[in-house]
Amino acid sequence: MAENKNSLGKELTKGILKENPTLVMLLGMCPTLAVTTQAKNGIGMGLATTFVLLGSNIVISLLRKIIPDKVRIPAFIVIIASFVTLIGFLLEGFVPDLYDSLGIYLTLITVNCIIFGRAEMFASKNGVVASACDAIGMGLGFTLALFLMGSVREIIGAGQWMGLTIPVMSKDPMLLFIMPAGGFFTLGVIIAAVNKLSKKKTPQELGCKGCPHAETCGKSGGDCQ
Protein backbone atom coordinates (compact mmCIF):
# COMPACT_ATOMS: atom_id res chain seq x y z
CA MET A 1 0.00 0.00 0.00
CA ALA A 2 2.84 2.36 0.91
CA GLU A 3 4.57 1.56 -2.38
CA ASN A 4 1.36 2.36 -4.25
CA LYS A 5 1.06 5.71 -2.45
CA ASN A 6 4.68 6.51 -3.28
CA SER A 7 4.04 5.67 -6.91
CA LEU A 8 0.98 7.95 -7.06
CA GLY A 9 2.94 10.69 -5.32
CA LYS A 10 5.66 10.36 -7.93
CA GLU A 11 3.13 10.63 -10.76
CA LEU A 12 1.64 13.70 -9.11
CA THR A 13 4.90 15.59 -8.68
CA LYS A 14 7.02 14.53 -11.66
CA GLY A 15 5.52 17.14 -13.98
CA ILE A 16 6.41 20.09 -11.76
CA LEU A 17 10.15 20.05 -12.42
CA LYS A 18 11.71 16.69 -13.30
CA GLU A 19 9.45 16.06 -16.33
CA ASN A 20 7.95 19.51 -16.76
CA PRO A 21 6.15 19.33 -20.13
CA THR A 22 7.23 22.82 -21.19
CA LEU A 23 10.59 23.48 -19.56
CA VAL A 24 12.05 19.97 -19.80
CA MET A 25 10.21 18.11 -22.56
CA LEU A 26 9.67 21.30 -24.61
CA LEU A 27 6.03 20.56 -25.44
CA GLY A 28 3.19 23.03 -25.90
CA MET A 29 5.40 25.77 -27.29
CA CYS A 30 2.65 27.59 -29.22
CA PRO A 31 0.51 28.63 -26.21
CA THR A 32 3.63 29.09 -24.09
CA LEU A 33 4.97 31.78 -26.41
CA ALA A 34 1.66 33.22 -27.62
CA VAL A 35 -0.43 33.86 -24.51
CA THR A 36 2.20 34.65 -21.88
CA THR A 37 2.37 38.39 -22.42
CA GLN A 38 0.44 38.59 -19.13
CA ALA A 39 0.63 36.38 -16.05
CA LYS A 40 -3.16 35.99 -15.81
CA ASN A 41 -3.29 34.67 -19.37
CA GLY A 42 -0.67 32.08 -18.46
CA ILE A 43 -2.70 30.94 -15.46
CA GLY A 44 -5.90 30.83 -17.52
CA MET A 45 -4.37 28.78 -20.32
CA GLY A 46 -2.62 26.48 -17.86
CA LEU A 47 -5.76 25.76 -15.83
CA ALA A 48 -7.85 25.28 -18.98
CA THR A 49 -5.31 22.79 -20.28
CA THR A 50 -5.22 21.04 -16.90
CA PHE A 51 -9.02 20.69 -16.98
CA VAL A 52 -8.92 19.11 -20.44
CA LEU A 53 -5.95 16.94 -19.52
CA LEU A 54 -7.61 15.64 -16.36
CA GLY A 55 -10.95 14.93 -18.00
CA SER A 56 -9.50 13.25 -21.08
CA ASN A 57 -7.03 11.16 -19.07
CA ILE A 58 -9.80 9.82 -16.84
CA VAL A 59 -12.15 8.99 -19.71
CA ILE A 60 -9.42 7.42 -21.85
CA SER A 61 -8.22 5.36 -18.90
CA LEU A 62 -11.77 4.12 -18.27
CA LEU A 63 -12.23 3.20 -21.94
CA ARG A 64 -8.71 1.93 -22.65
CA LYS A 65 -9.82 -1.71 -22.86
CA ILE A 66 -12.87 -0.90 -24.99
CA ILE A 67 -11.45 1.43 -27.64
CA PRO A 68 -10.13 -0.65 -30.60
CA ASP A 69 -6.45 -0.09 -31.25
CA LYS A 70 -7.07 0.83 -34.90
CA VAL A 71 -9.27 3.80 -34.01
CA ARG A 72 -7.64 4.92 -30.78
CA ILE A 73 -6.23 8.16 -32.22
CA PRO A 74 -9.57 9.40 -33.63
CA ALA A 75 -11.24 8.33 -30.39
CA PHE A 76 -8.68 10.26 -28.32
CA ILE A 77 -9.21 13.38 -30.44
CA VAL A 78 -13.01 13.21 -30.03
CA ILE A 79 -12.68 12.85 -26.25
CA ILE A 80 -10.17 15.70 -25.98
CA ALA A 81 -12.21 17.95 -28.28
CA SER A 82 -15.30 17.38 -26.14
CA PHE A 83 -13.55 18.69 -23.03
CA VAL A 84 -12.07 21.62 -25.00
CA THR A 85 -15.58 22.57 -26.15
CA LEU A 86 -16.84 22.35 -22.57
CA ILE A 87 -14.09 24.54 -21.10
CA GLY A 88 -14.61 26.99 -23.97
CA PHE A 89 -18.29 27.36 -23.10
CA LEU A 90 -17.46 27.79 -19.40
CA LEU A 91 -14.85 30.49 -20.00
CA GLU A 92 -17.02 32.33 -22.51
CA GLY A 93 -19.93 32.32 -20.08
CA PHE A 94 -18.14 33.11 -16.81
CA VAL A 95 -14.79 34.70 -17.75
CA PRO A 96 -15.37 36.38 -21.13
CA ASP A 97 -12.30 38.65 -20.87
CA LEU A 98 -10.00 35.66 -20.42
CA TYR A 99 -11.83 33.83 -23.21
CA ASP A 100 -11.16 36.73 -25.58
CA SER A 101 -7.51 36.98 -24.47
CA LEU A 102 -6.80 33.30 -25.14
CA GLY A 103 -8.55 33.46 -28.50
CA ILE A 104 -7.83 30.68 -30.96
CA TYR A 105 -5.22 29.13 -28.69
CA LEU A 106 -8.00 27.86 -26.44
CA THR A 107 -9.45 25.86 -29.33
CA LEU A 108 -5.99 24.61 -30.25
CA ILE A 109 -5.80 22.76 -26.92
CA THR A 110 -7.42 19.94 -28.90
CA VAL A 111 -4.15 19.31 -30.73
CA ASN A 112 -1.87 20.21 -27.83
CA CYS A 113 0.89 17.60 -27.86
CA ILE A 114 1.01 17.54 -24.05
CA ILE A 115 -2.57 16.27 -23.80
CA PHE A 116 -2.36 13.86 -26.70
CA GLY A 117 1.03 12.61 -25.52
CA ARG A 118 -0.24 11.81 -22.02
CA ALA A 119 -3.29 10.09 -23.49
CA GLU A 120 -1.18 7.90 -25.76
CA MET A 121 1.74 7.21 -23.44
CA PHE A 122 0.07 7.05 -20.03
CA ALA A 123 -3.73 7.15 -19.76
CA SER A 124 -4.24 4.41 -22.35
CA LYS A 125 -1.94 2.10 -20.37
CA ASN A 126 -2.70 2.87 -16.71
CA GLY A 127 -5.57 2.97 -14.22
CA VAL A 128 -7.87 5.88 -13.50
CA VAL A 129 -6.25 7.10 -10.28
CA ALA A 130 -2.73 7.02 -11.69
CA SER A 131 -3.91 8.74 -14.88
CA ALA A 132 -5.64 11.46 -12.85
CA CYS A 133 -2.47 12.04 -10.80
CA ASP A 134 -0.42 12.20 -13.97
CA ALA A 135 -2.81 14.74 -15.48
CA ILE A 136 -2.82 16.95 -12.37
CA GLY A 137 0.98 16.87 -12.11
CA MET A 138 1.58 17.64 -15.77
CA GLY A 139 -1.13 20.29 -15.80
CA LEU A 140 0.30 21.96 -12.71
CA GLY A 141 3.78 21.96 -14.21
CA PHE A 142 2.44 23.48 -17.43
CA THR A 143 0.51 26.13 -15.49
CA LEU A 144 3.53 27.07 -13.39
CA ALA A 145 5.69 27.37 -16.50
CA LEU A 146 3.18 29.66 -18.23
CA PHE A 147 2.68 31.72 -15.07
CA LEU A 148 6.43 32.20 -14.69
CA MET A 149 6.80 33.14 -18.35
CA GLY A 150 3.89 35.55 -18.17
CA SER A 151 5.12 37.15 -14.95
CA VAL A 152 8.62 37.82 -16.28
CA ARG A 153 7.38 39.21 -19.59
CA GLU A 154 4.66 41.35 -18.03
CA ILE A 155 6.88 42.85 -15.34
CA ILE A 156 9.81 43.67 -17.63
CA GLY A 157 7.83 44.38 -20.79
CA ALA A 158 4.87 46.32 -19.37
CA GLY A 159 5.89 47.35 -15.88
CA GLN A 160 2.83 45.62 -14.44
CA TRP A 161 1.91 42.33 -12.79
CA MET A 162 -1.58 40.91 -12.32
CA GLY A 163 -3.07 44.39 -12.69
CA LEU A 164 -0.59 46.02 -10.31
CA THR A 165 1.81 48.72 -11.47
CA ILE A 166 5.49 48.16 -10.71
CA PRO A 167 6.85 51.66 -9.87
CA VAL A 168 10.40 51.26 -11.17
CA MET A 169 9.60 49.13 -14.23
CA SER A 170 6.55 51.09 -15.38
CA LYS A 171 8.57 54.24 -16.14
CA ASP A 172 10.63 52.68 -18.89
CA PRO A 173 9.44 49.12 -19.71
CA MET A 174 11.33 46.99 -22.21
CA LEU A 175 8.61 46.41 -24.80
CA LEU A 176 10.76 43.76 -26.46
CA PHE A 177 9.70 41.28 -23.76
CA ILE A 178 6.03 41.34 -24.74
CA MET A 179 6.94 40.76 -28.39
CA PRO A 180 7.68 37.32 -29.92
CA ALA A 181 11.45 37.80 -29.70
CA GLY A 182 11.15 38.54 -25.99
CA GLY A 183 9.09 35.39 -25.52
CA PHE A 184 11.80 33.23 -27.06
CA PHE A 185 14.49 34.93 -24.99
CA THR A 186 12.55 34.55 -21.74
CA LEU A 187 11.79 30.91 -22.45
CA GLY A 188 15.44 30.17 -23.20
CA VAL A 189 16.64 31.78 -19.97
CA ILE A 190 14.04 29.95 -17.86
CA ILE A 191 14.83 26.59 -19.48
CA ALA A 192 18.55 27.14 -18.82
CA ALA A 193 17.83 27.98 -15.18
CA VAL A 194 15.61 24.91 -14.72
CA ASN A 195 18.22 22.65 -16.29
CA LYS A 196 20.83 24.08 -13.94
CA LEU A 197 18.63 23.49 -10.89
CA SER A 198 17.59 19.97 -11.86
CA LYS A 199 21.08 18.82 -12.84
CA LYS A 200 22.36 16.31 -10.30
CA LYS A 201 25.88 15.05 -9.89
CA THR A 202 26.27 11.34 -9.45
CA PRO A 203 28.19 10.75 -6.19
CA GLN A 204 31.44 8.88 -6.63
CA GLU A 205 31.40 5.49 -4.99
CA LEU A 206 34.04 4.99 -2.31
CA GLY A 207 36.32 1.96 -2.04
CA CYS A 208 37.76 -0.29 -4.74
CA LYS A 209 34.53 -0.39 -6.75
CA GLY A 210 34.71 3.35 -7.30
CA CYS A 211 38.39 3.36 -8.18
CA PRO A 212 39.28 3.51 -11.90
CA HIS A 213 42.36 1.32 -11.24
CA ALA A 214 40.54 -1.38 -9.26
CA GLU A 215 41.10 -4.05 -11.91
CA THR A 216 44.88 -3.53 -12.08
CA CYS A 217 45.89 -2.89 -8.49
CA GLY A 218 44.97 -6.37 -7.23
CA LYS A 219 43.24 -5.16 -4.09
CA SER A 220 39.65 -5.91 -3.16
CA GLY A 221 37.08 -5.19 -0.51
CA GLY A 222 38.37 -2.72 2.05
CA ASP A 223 42.11 -3.14 1.27
CA CYS A 224 42.43 0.19 -0.52
CA GLN A 225 44.31 2.79 1.54
Image (cartoon, rainbow, N blue to C red):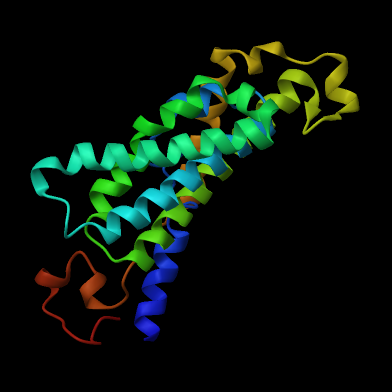
Q: Which residue is drawn at the image coordinates 58% and 44% (left, top)?
A: 144
Instruction: Confirm whether residue 146 shows in the render.
Output: no
Asked whether, in this view, residue 144 is left or right of residue 209, the answer is: right
- Extreme right residue here? 167
Residue 85 location (% of width, % of height): 46, 34
Asked whether, in this view, residue 151 is left or right of residue 123, the answer is: right
Q: Nearer the viewer, residue 6 or 17?
A: 6
Count of residue discs? 0
Asked whether, in this view, residue 217 is left or right of residue 53, the answer is: left
Residue 172 location (% of width, % of height): 83, 13
Q: Which residue is drawn at the image coordinates 28% and 78% (left, top)?
A: 207
Q: Which residue is drawn at the image coordinates 43% and 42% (left, top)?
A: 83
Q: Which residue is drawn at the image coordinates 68% and 37% (left, top)?
A: 94
Question: Residue 133 occupies which quadrant of the picture?
Answer: bottom left
Q: Is residue 203 above or below residue 53?
A: below
Question: Residue 65 occupies which quadrant of the picture?
Answer: bottom left
Residue 176 location (% of width, % of height): 65, 12
Q: Is residue 169 above or below residue 207?
A: above
Instruction: Confirm whether residue 112 shows in the render.
Output: yes
Quadrant containing the C terminus in the rendered view: bottom left
Q: Nearer the viewer, residue 74 or 153?
A: 74
Residue 92 location (% of width, % of height): 61, 30
Asked whether, in this view, residue 68 is left or right of residue 187, the answer is: left
Q: Nearer the viewer, residue 103 or 189?
A: 103
Quadrant containing the N terminus in the rendered view: bottom left
